[in-house]
Amino acid sequence: MAIPLEPIADSPAGDDRASIVCLHCGQSQPVARKALSIVCRFCHKSLRLEDMPIKDYQARRSVETCGVVTVEKKGQIVADRVLCGGMVVRGKVKGTVKSAGPILVGPDAEIKGDVTAPSLAVGAGAILEGRYRIGYPNQPISNAS
Ligand SMILES: [Zn+2]
């Protein structure tokens, strides 16, 4: 009698695999969960996969990761553009934000800039200033304007 094998997860995102959406071409693809960066198999651009915690003031030309950008209470991003797999904002963001995943905005947070995301949750008291385009999943986010 055969020994039962370990159950295999039904979802494509098993233990060591995750699925990401390319920030540049919008194609989803599996990646190893431990990978910190990959080259997109469709558009051949390199992608960071790490989550990015922002705990202080950071001025950059751009912030790009397929991971989740978390802006802590004392954190602040000033960037031309933020491309991310998801975002949690408790502090301040200034710049154009394009997220492949949900954006959560805390009650004391502030976002100044245009925001594109498949979904948005905002705490009462947050300050949002800009154009919002919410609810269009699976579009390429870096070229959409
Ligand atoms: Zn791509």
Image (cartoon, grey):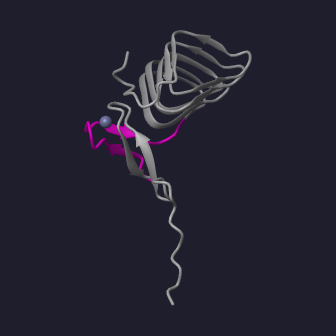
Image height check: is 15 above or below 46? below
Identify the residue at horizontal 44%, vertical 46% (top origin). Answer: 19
- Left or right: residue 38 compared with residue 93: left
Give above or below for 91 relative to 52.
above
Secondary structure, magenta segment, majority class: loop
Q: In the rendered image, which quarter is residue 123 located in? A: top right
Residue at (43%, 20%) from the top-left corner? 81
- Kindly indicate the quadrant of the structure image that contains residue 37: top left
Residue nearest the viewer, comparing 48 with 86: 86
Between 61 and 96, the one lying in front of the other is 96
* Residue 58 vertical placement versus 20 (above, below): above
Can you give x and y, in whole percent of width and height, for residue 17 in the image? 45, 55
Quadrant position of ligand 1: top left
Where residue 13 appears, x then y in whole percent? 48, 53
Q: Quadrant of the C terminus?
A: top left
Specify the segment rendered in magenta. 33-52
Residue 33, position as x, y percentages in the image: 46, 53
Task: Farthest residue to the front: give it.
Answer: 1
Residue shown at 37% from the left, 28% from the top: 140
Residue 20 image-quadrant placement: top left
Count of numbered labels shown in the rendering: 0
Query: Which residue is rendered at x = 36% and y = 19% of the image?
Result: 144
Q: Is residue 34 magenta?
A: yes
* Side (left or right) of 40 relative to 126: left
Q: Nearer the viewer, residue 123 or 7?
A: 7
Q: Nearer the viewer, residue 59 or 33?
A: 33
**Residue 2: image location, x then y, percent:** 49, 86
